[in-house]
Image (spheres, rainbow, N blue to C red):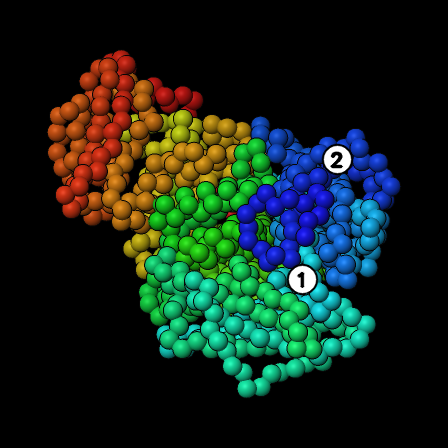
C-alpha cells in the first residue's frame, strides 16, 4: 500500500504492512490554538521531513535553547487496499511529551522522550476523505518526566521515524506498550538445548469471538525454515474487542549460539497467527531475529558469555550529532556502530536513555553486548506522578527491546543524589528493580553510581550489579588513582559484582601540549588531546589489572552537545569523546583502545596534529597492536621498541629546526605497516614555554 505523504526513503526492514510516514509534514515551533482541527489552515507552516528536531540549529553556540511546544500536522490518505483493516500510528519517539490527534480526536498523550508509542486510528478514519494527524510535542522541563538532570540536551520534536501499521482485525497487537507484540523468552539456553517460549499479545478487533492459535517457526541465519509438525494446536477463544496472550514454544537441539563479536549468529523466527485456521498475521524479519545465548556475572571473575569468560570492555554512546541533534539517520547510526567496532569494543552502554531500535539491531548483528537504561539521571522527585512515569518508561524499554539478544542488562539509574534536589530515591528504585524482574526474569539490572558519600545507604545494593562513574585524572586526583578507587568500590560492594560505567577526560584536537605532566582544569578552555590519552592509558591499566570487574565503559565514544558547558575549544560541547562530534576525527585515545582491543595490525603516531612546535625536545609515542615498532626521524632510524602493553615510547628525541618527518613501522608475517606525520619546529625554545600552542591554561 502507499499513503500520500509516506515514502520509503529509509532502509530499515519492516514487515510489509508497515509504511514509513516520513515526508509531507507541516511544522511550527509554537503553541497554536485549534491546530488539531481537521480544517485548520497550516499553509503558513514549514514543510519538514522526519526525523526532525526544532533544536538542530539553536544549540550550536551553547547556552539556552528552545524548550517548549511545537506542532506537526500531516495529511494521510488511507488507500482503498486498507479497507476493512485496522490502522495504527507508531511513533518511535517524540521528545518529550506528545499529544496525538487524528481527525480532531485526541488519541492520547505520551510522556517520555525516548520510547515508542502507538495509537489505533481505525474508528476515526474517513474512508475516501481527508485524514489529518496532528501532534503537539513539548520538550519543556516536566517535573514528572525523567530525565530531570544530566548534561545532555533535551532536543524537541518527532526525532525518530513514524510508521503506519496496517493489520487484520485479529492481529498481534502493536498496542502493548508499542512493542512488536511478540516476546521470545529464552527460558533455557545451553550448548545442548535451547527452549524459547514465544508469547504473542493478540487483539480481536471484531465484534464477535474468534478462535485463534499461534505457530512459531525458526529458520537458520540464511532464512531456511524448519518444518514443524505439531501434534496438538492450542486454540484459544478471544472475545470481541479483547486482547489475550497466546503461546508457543521453540526447541532447538545443539543450538548455534550468539557468541558476542566472535560469532553473533542469529536464527530467524516467524510467529504466525491463525484465526479460524486462516493466517491473519505474521511477525518475522528483523523483529524475529533470535540470538540464543546465556550469560552470568561472577563478583570475582567478571562476565561470562555462554559459559566462557568474556571480559567486557567498551564505551558509552550518546545519540546526538552536530546540526541534527537527535534527528539522526540510519546511515549516521551505521557510522557510529562501525566506529565502535573499528575500535574493538565488545560492549556498549547506551547512555542515558533508550536509543533508536535500529541501533540495537546493529548491536545484535555485530555482537556488541549492550547495557541499556532508562533516563533516571541525577534526580528523583518523590511524587506519585514521577514514579508512575519512571515505571512506564522502564516497562516500555523492556517490552520494546525484549527480543534483542545484544541486551544483557537493564540500567535503572545514573548518578542519583549528588545534584540539586533529589528526594530519597530508594523506594522508587526498589519498585523499579521488582518491575524489571517481573517484566524480564532472564536479564540482570545495573546502575551507575558516583556517590562515595553513600548519601542513600542501601541504594547501591538494589540492582543486581553496580557500576561506577569515576574520573580520576580529570575531575579529581591523578589518572593512576583509578587503582585505589576500584579497590575501594570492590571493598564497599560486599559480594555484588562491580563494573566501571564511565571514566575519561576532555580533549580538543586543536590543543596540544608537549611533554605534558599535569592535567588541565576540566572547566577551563585548555583541554589538550595528549592528556586525555594519558588518562585513558592509566585508568584502563587499572581496569585491566582487575579481571573481577564485570565490565568497563569509557566515557564517551563521541563528543556530544551539552548546552551549558563553556569549556574546551567549543562552547556547548562535552569533549570527552574518543571521536569528534562530526565523527570525522578519531582522537589519539581512540587508537590506544584500538591497539588494546584489535588484532588487525596497525601503527599510529600520537600527537600527530601537534604540527607547529617550538620545543625541540620531545617524546614520541606510538600506539600499535604489533609486538615491535621501529621509529625513524627524518629518515634516520632511532630504534625499535618491543612492548606488550601496546604503548611505544621514545624519550629525548631532538627535532631539527624546520620540517621533521616522523615515521613508525612494524612488521608482522612479512608485511610492513607504517604511519607517518610531519612536525614543524619553528624557533628556538624560549625558557619556560612548553609549547607554542598552549595558550591560556
Ligand atoms: C558523568 C555523567 C555524564 C557526564 C559525565 C561528564 O558522570 O554520568 O552524563 O557527561 O559525567 O562528562 O561529566
Residue found at x 83% / y 41%: 35
In the displayed orientation, state which residue is furthest to the top.
Answer: 683
Residue 420 lies, with reference to residue 413, above or below; the image says: above
Q: CA distance from mark 2 to mark 1?
A: 29 Å
Which of the 4 quarters of the picture holds residue 471?
top left
| Circle 1 crowding by C-alpha within 10 Å: few under 14, some 14–19, many from 20 | many
What secondary structure is found at the residue carrying circle 2? strand
Residue 212 lies, with reference to residue 590, above or below; the image says: below
Instruction: Using the rendered image of the protein, determine whether residue 140 is visible from the camera's viewpoint.
Output: no
Which residue occupies the foreground of this view, 426 or 558?
Answer: 558
Which of the 4 quarters of the picture holds residue 530?
top left
Residue found at x 31% / y 29%: 608
What secondary structure is found at the residue carrying circle 1? loop
Q: Which residue is mark 1?
A: 174
**Left-right relation of 305 to 160:** left
Which residue occupies the foreground of this view, 219 or 43?
Answer: 219
Percent from the top left, x then y, of residue 392? 66, 60
Which residue occupies the foreground of this view, 308 or 245?
Answer: 245
> Which of the numbered marks, if any, corresponds to residue 375?
none
Residue found at x 47% / y 30%: 568
**Left-right relation of 431 to 581:** right
In the displayed orientation, state which residue is furthest to the bottom.
Answer: 231
Amino acid at each position: 500500500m502507499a499513503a500520500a505523504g509516506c515514502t520509503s526513503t529509509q532502509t530499515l526492514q519492516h514487515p510489509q504492512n508497515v509504511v514509513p510516514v516520513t515526508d509531507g509534514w507541516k511544522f511550527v515551533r509554537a503553541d497554536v490554538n485549534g491546530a488539531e482541527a481537521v480544517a485548520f489552515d497550516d499553509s503558513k507552516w514549514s514543510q519538514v521531513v522526519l526525523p526532525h528536531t526544532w533544536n538542530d540549529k539553536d544549540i550550536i553556540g551553547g547556552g539556552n535553547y528552545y524548550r517548549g511546544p511545537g506542532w506537526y500536522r500531516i495529511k494521510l490518505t488511507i488507500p482503498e487496499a486498507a479497507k476493512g483493516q485496522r490502522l495504527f500510528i507508531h511513533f518511535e519517539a517524540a521528545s518529550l511529551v506528545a499529544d496525538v490527534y487524528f481527525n480532531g480526536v485526541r488519541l492520547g498523550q505520551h510522556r517520555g522522550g525516548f520510547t515508542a508509542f502507538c495509537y489505533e486510528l481505525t474508528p476515526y478514519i474517513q474512508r475516501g476523505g481527508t485524514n489529518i494527524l496532528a501532534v503537539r510535542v513539548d520538550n519543556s522541563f516536566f517535573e514528572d518526566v525523567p530525565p530531570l538532570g544530566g548534561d545532555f540536551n533535551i532536543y524537541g520534536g518527532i526525532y525518530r521515524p513514524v510508521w503506519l501499521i496496517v493489520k487484520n482485525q485479529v492481529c498481534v497487537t502493536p498496542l502493548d506498550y508499542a512493542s512488536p507484540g511478540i516476546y521470545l523468552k529464552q527460558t533455557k539456553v545451553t550448548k545442548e538445548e535451547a527452549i524459547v517460549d514465544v508469547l504473542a499479545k493478540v487483539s480481536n478487533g471484531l465484534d464477535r469471538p474468534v478462535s485463534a492459535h499461534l505457530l512459531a517457526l525458526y529458520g537458520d541465519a540464511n532464512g531456511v525454515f524448519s518444518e514443524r509438525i505439531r501434534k496438538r494446536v492450542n486454540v484459544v477463544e478471544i472475545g470481541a474487542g479483547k486482547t489475550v496472550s497466546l503461546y508457543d514454544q521453540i526447541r532447538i537441539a545443539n543450538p548455534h549460539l550468539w557468541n558476542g563479536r566472535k560469532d553473533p549468529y542469529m536464527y530467524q523466527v516467524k510467529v504466525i497467527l491463525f484465526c479460524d485456521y486462516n493466517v491473519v498475521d505474521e511477525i518475522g524479519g528483523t523483529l524475529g531475529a533470535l540470538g540464543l545465548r546465556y550469560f552470568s556475572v561472577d563478583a570475582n571473575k567478571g562476565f561470562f558469555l555462554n559459559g566462557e569468560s568474556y571480559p567486557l570492555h567498551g564505551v558509552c554512546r550518546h545519540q546526538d550529532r552536530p546540526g541534527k541533534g537527535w534527528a539522526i539517520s540510519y546511515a549516521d547510526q551505521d557510522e557510529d556502530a562501525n566506529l565502535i567496532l573499528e575500535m574493538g569494543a565488545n560492549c556498549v552502554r547506551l547512555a542515558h536513555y533508550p536509543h533508536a531500535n535500529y541501533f540495537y539491531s546493529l548491536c545484535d548483528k555485530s555482537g556488541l553486548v549492550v547495557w541499556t537504561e532508562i533516563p533516571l539521571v541525577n534526580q528523583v522527585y518523590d511524587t506519585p506522578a514521577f514514579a508512575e512515569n519512571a515505571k512506564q518508561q522502564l516497562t516500555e524499554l523492556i517490552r520494546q527491546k525484549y527480543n534483542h539478544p545484544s541486551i544483557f542488562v537493564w540500567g535503572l539509574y545514573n548518578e542519583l543524589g549528588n545534584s540539586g534536589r533529589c528526594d530519597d530515591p530508594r523506594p522508587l528504585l526498589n519498585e523499579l528493580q521488582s518491575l524489571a524482574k517481573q517484566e524480564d526474569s532472564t536479564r540482570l539490572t545495573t546502575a551507575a553510581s558516583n556517590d562515595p558519600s553513600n548519601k542513600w545507604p542501601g541504594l547501591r545494593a538494589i540492582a543486581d550489579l553496580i557500576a561506577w562513574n569515576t574520573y580520576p585524572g580529570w575531575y579529581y586526583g591523578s589518572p593512576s588513582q583509578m587503582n585505589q578507587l576500584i579497590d575501594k568500590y570492590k571493598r564497599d560492594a560486599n559480594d555484588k559484582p562491580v563494573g566501571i560505567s564511565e571514566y575519561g577526560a576532555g580533549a580538543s584536537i586543536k590543543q596540544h601540549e608537549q611533554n605534558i605532566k599535569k592535567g588541565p582544569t576540566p572547566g577551563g578552555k585548555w583541554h589538550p588531546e595528549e592528556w586525555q590519552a594519558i588518562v585513558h592509558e592509566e585508568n584502563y591499566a587499572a581496569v585491566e589489572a582487575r579481571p573481577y570487574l564485570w565490565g568497563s565503559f569509557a566515557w564517551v565514544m563521541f563528543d556530544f552537545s551539552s548546552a551549558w558547558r563553556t569549556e574546551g575549544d567549543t562552547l556547548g560541547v562535552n569533549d570527552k569523546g574518543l571521536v569528534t562530534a562530526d565523527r570525522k576525527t578519531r582522537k589519539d585515545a581512540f587508537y590506544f583502545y584500538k591497539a588494546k582491543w584489535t588484532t588487525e595490525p596497525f601503527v599510529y603516531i600520537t600527537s600527530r596534529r601537534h604540527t607547529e612546535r617550538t620545543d625541540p625536545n620531545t617524546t614520541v609515542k606510538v600506539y600499535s597492536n604489533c609486538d615491535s615498532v621501529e621509529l625513524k626521524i627524518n629518515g634516520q632510524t632511532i630504534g625499535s621498541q618491543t612492548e606488550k602493553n601496546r604503548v611505544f615510547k621514545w624519550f629525548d628525541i631532538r627535532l631539527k629546526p624546520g620540517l621533521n618527518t616522523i615515521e613508525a613501522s612494524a612488521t608482522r608475517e612479512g608485511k610492513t605497516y607504517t604511519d607517518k606525520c610531519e612536525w614543524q619546529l619553528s624557533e628556538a625554545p624560549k625558557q619556560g614555554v612548553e609549547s607554542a600552542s598552549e595558550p591560556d591554561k
